[in-house]
Image (cartoon, helix red, strand yellow):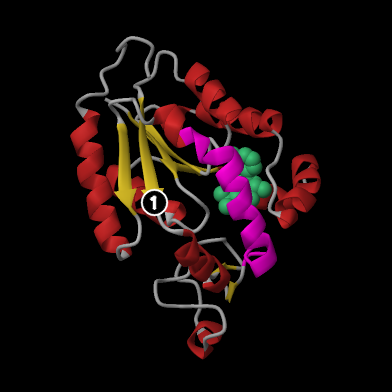
């Protein structure tokens, strides 16, 4: 059965890192709407040009644009065995649209990674990504460290940089936006038998183990055609 996962949780909870791990261990694609948008910005496409200012402010790109991106991505053949959505849905309207896109597919498994705000601010304002390919820097490298300045990306050889939206002011705005728009998705999903809450404060390997166990635990309850697919 296809494993269709979404990773909820605030910015900095570790969704991207964990989605990469699970994508690797299960052999399914990770679909990050943030990565897709950053690529569009880098390529100066029409969507990228429109999204850049919104992203730089820490606000959300319109539901219409994001739903269009995800719809098109879920039409591709490589999601037949499953997928992991990282950073989508972020609003109730997006979650409703996703439910519509799930008709005829295995039900969603929802992984909510929970981390307190103070820890999120610390993580986001020190994290690094590759300036070349956007991959996360290895664990232990933090913005401002001398080791980080000399390190190179294992995937493309690029150097590590801070994301444009990982400065203190924008981080606070993104956390506010999360509380207002995205946090309600916990209520939206938590009654489903396929919802799992994960303590994201542990080291990444431990969080990964908890996610793998939780996904295996609920996957059996996600029977195709089970009522509304919810
Ligand atoms: P992320 O990499 O997931 O933190 O996303 C970076 C930025 O891209 C966000 O702060 C938003 O501006 C935009 N973005 C990514 N995913 C979405 C989404 N599902 N809905 C609206 N905006 C999004």
Name the quarter where the C terminus is drawn. top left
Q: Over which residues does the magenta segment extend?
A: 163-185
For the point 49% across and 72% down, which residue is it? 153
Task: Tell me the element at label 1.
Answer: strand
Q: Residue at x 60, y 41 (%)?
A: 180
Q: Main secondary structure of the magenta part?
A: helix
Question: Does the beta carbon of the residue at mark 1 sit less than 8 Å from ligand 1?
Answer: no
Residue 69 sits in which quadrant? top right
Name, please, the residue furthest toward the bottom. 146
Give residue 156's position: percent from left, percent from top.
52, 67
- Is residue 188 depicted above or below 209 in this figure? above
Taking the spot 48% from the left edge, 87% from the top edge, the residue there is 147
Measured as percent of width and height from the top left, residue 63 is found at: 67, 31
Q: Name the side, left or right, on which 219 lies relative to 156.
A: left
Q: Quadrant of residue 62?
A: top right
Left or right: where does residue 170 sit relative to residue 207? Answer: right
Q: Is residue 162 something that shows in the picture?
A: yes
Q: Quadrant of the N terminus?
A: top left
- Give x and y (percent) for residue 203: 30, 66
- 120 in relation to 55, above or below: below
Which residue is disc 1 drawn over? Answer: 114
Query: Label 1 crowding class (10 Å Cα cut-off): few <14, some 14-19, many 20+?
Result: some
């Amino acid at each position: 059965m296809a494993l269709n996962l979404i990773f909820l949780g605030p910015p900095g909870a570790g969704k991207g890192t964990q989605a990469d791990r699970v994508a690797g261990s299960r052999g399914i694609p990770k679909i990050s709407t943030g990565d897709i948008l950053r690529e569009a910005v880098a390529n100066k496409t029409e969507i990228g040009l429109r999204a850049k200012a919104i992203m730089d402010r820490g606000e959300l790109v319109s539901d219409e644009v994001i739903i269009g991106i995800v719809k098109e991505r879920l039409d591709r053949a490589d999601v037949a065995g499953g997928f992991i959505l990282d950073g989508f849905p972020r609003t109730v309207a997006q979650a409703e649209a996703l439910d519509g896109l799930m008709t005829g597919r295995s039900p969603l498994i929802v992984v909510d990674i929970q981390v307190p705000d103070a820890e999120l601010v610390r993580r986001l304002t020190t994290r690094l990504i590759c300036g070349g390919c956007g991959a996360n820097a290895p664990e232990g490298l933090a913005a401002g460290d001398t080791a980080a300045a000399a390190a190179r990306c294992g995937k493309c050889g690029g150097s590590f940089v801070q994301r444009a939206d990982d400065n203190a002011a924008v981080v606070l705005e993104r956390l506010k936006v999360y509380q207002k728009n995205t946090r309600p998705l916990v209520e939206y999903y938590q009654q489903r038998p396929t919802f799992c809450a994960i303590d994201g404060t542990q080291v990444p390997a431990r969080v990964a183990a908890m996610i793998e166990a939780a996904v295996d635990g609920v996957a059996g309850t996600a029977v195709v055609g089970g009522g509304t697919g919810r």
